[in-house]
Amino acid sequence: MSFSNTFDTTNTGSGVSNREDLTDVLTILAPEETPILSSANKQRASATFVEWTVDSLSAPSTTGISEGADVTAFTDQFAGRAKLGNRVQKFRRDYMVSDLQEAVDSVGPAKIAQAEAKAIRELKRDVEATIAGTQDLATEDGAGTANRLRGLGDWLDGAAGSVPAAFQTPAASIYTTAEANTTAFTESALNDIITSIFAETGTTNNLMLVADTGLRRVIADFARFGAAGTAASEAGVRSVNYDGNSGSIKLSVDLYESDHGVVSIVNQNPDCAPNFGGNSTTGSGYVVNPEYYGIHELIPMGSTRLPNLGGGERGFVDCALTLGVYHPGAHGVIQDVT
């Protein structure tokens, strides 16, 4: 004997008249944070190639001067100056909603304003992934090659190229391994990077470690200790400070206090993480000082509506900018080349 049911909607029956339960809740299932972009100082660009000069001080001298000695030799104080630069890259995301979609009721909703807002959010992620990337700059040639900015990973690789040797990131500020998202990356290794940066800048504040998921978990375990000096992974014991008046124990590390300054630990957007060694990993990160890098905008981020030709409202969001790394030695990098 047949009976009415909810699952058969292909034949005539009660199932075809069941109402849809569709809420107005819309969830974006993708990470949106852009810590490197958000922490950068913003400046105005006026050309498609942005340049800045760098200089250094000579080593301190402890040699005394004899009484009555005349000055017979002179130093060119600007002989060590160099010029660095980066190419402005254009970013764009388009959007469109049909005239019928604009007219109907929808959850979310799905109108032209929401399409525009989503395109802006996608554009910010494009910029974050590019400035955090490992690519070198490229110059427009009119034959298919567009302007491309040099990513932070290429600025900090310590290799000969666009950065003169005197201003390259020191080797001690670069940690390269095939397993940075494991216990191979130690607290001592992080301190070595921080110390190396201090030796370049002499400053102890403003450092920020933008860490991918695997690296972040390793750093959280820096507070773990084992018995008789054994490693945490061997002992399986975590030592934490517990406030007896609190009902929770915090195991994450947001601020790391080293001998040469306090470092803020922030999560890197996993969709925008740099790709070292040609493989996707979770153990990479940048130790950056926001004082020594910035974003130069030739075209600020904005939206442009295009004419409706009959199909519906349309437009695009775009920007043109580049990354300025004013002192490559003021930053460090943890490269997982797995």
Image (cartoon, grey):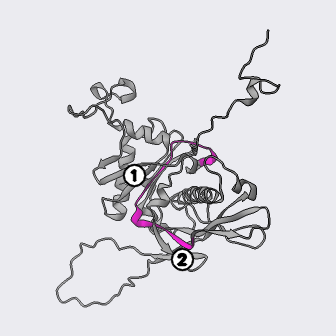
Q: Is residue 180 visible?
A: no
Residue 288 among magenta residues: yes
Q: Is residue 81 left or right of residue 204?
A: right
Q: Residue furthest top?
A: 1
Q: Which residue is mark 1?
A: 193
| Residue drawn where x is 36% and y is 29% of the image | 232
- Viewer-side residue, 125 vs 203: 125
| Label 2 Cα crowd, 10 Å radius (few <14 / some 14-19 / many 20+) | some
* View extreme (right): residue: 11
- Residue type at mark 2 is Ala
Q: Quadrant of residue 58?
A: bottom left
Three-letter code, disc 1: Ile
Q: Which residue is mark 2?
A: 45
Q: Quadrant of residue 314?
A: bottom right
Using residue 321 as the reference point, say whether residue 200 is left or right of it. left
Please give left or right for residue 227 compared with residue 55 in the image: left
User: In front here: 104 or 141?
Assistant: 104
**Stretch in magenta:** 277-300
User: Quadrant of the image for the N terminus?
Assistant: top right
Q: Give how far across and how far down residue 63 sits, in percent.
A: 24, 75
Query: Which sits earlier in the primary sequence, circle 2 or circle 1?
Result: 2
| Residue 282 image point, x, y percent | 53, 42
Disc number for residue 12: none
User: Residue 78 in the image: x percent, y percent?
Assistant: 41, 82
Instruction: Determine whether 300 is above or below 28 in the image.
Output: below
Kind of element beneath mark 1: helix
Q: Would you place residue 168 above or below residue 215 in this image?
A: below
